[in-house]
Image: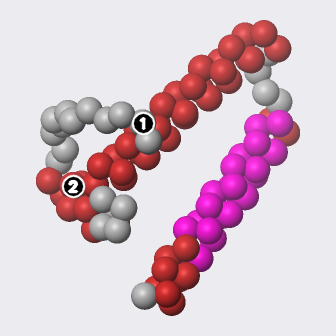
Amino acid sequence: MASTKKVTVTIPEDLLDEIRSEAAERGLSAYVAEALRFKRDRDRLRELSGWLQEEHGPLSEEERTAAFEELEDLDAEHERRRTAGKHDAGESA
């Protein structure tokens, strides 16, 4: 397990309430760490995308459409797995 460090952050109260209800089983710290990793990964992808466009030119509309379709498929698969995980956890309880 990676070492951890306690930090203080300020979050709007309404957002915190929503996050706490969604993160109940995992815990707030795990939820926030996952969200920060996701944000970091998106930033890195954006940086890579910028570099690739500088090197190879911008995407065509067809390439952009194909990429968005693939992302939608990945999002749907993620949602399916998330929903299945909640369903499976409920059955074993």
Q: Position of residue 85 (x, y in %)?
A: 55, 73
Q: Is residue 67 magenta?
A: yes
Q: Is residue 7 magenta?
A: no
Residue drawn at (55%, 34%), measured in percent from left and top?
42
The quarter of the picture where residue 5 lies is top left
Query: Relative to residue 81, is residue 40 depicted above or below?
Result: above
Residue drawn at (46%, 38%), measured in percent from left and top?
37
Nearest-to-viewer mark from 1 and 2:
1
Quadrant where the image shows the N terminus: top left
Question: Label 1 belongs to which residue?
Answer: 2
Q: How far apart are marks 1 and 2 (CA)?
A: 25 Å
Badge 2 density bin: few <14, some 14–19, many ≥20, Cα 10 Å: few
Q: Where is residue 21 in the image (x, y as percent from the top left)?
A: 28, 68
Secondary element at image label 2: helix
Secondary element at image label 1: loop
Question: Label 2 belongs to which residue?
Answer: 16
Query: Relative to residue 70, is residue 42 depicted above or below?
Result: above
Q: Mark 2 is on which residue type?
A: Leu
Residue drawn at (34%, 68%), measured in percent from left and top?
25
Q: Is the magenta stretch mostly helix, strand or loop?
A: helix
**Image side of residue 57 versus residue 14, left or right:** right
Query: Relative to residue 44, is residue 55 depicted above or below?
Result: above
Q: Looking at the image, is mark 1 or mark 2 earlier in the sequence?
A: 1
**Image side of residue 36 versus residue 20, left or right:** right
**Residue extending furthest toward the top:** 55
Magenta segment range? 63-84
> Which numbered tag is attached to residue 71?
none
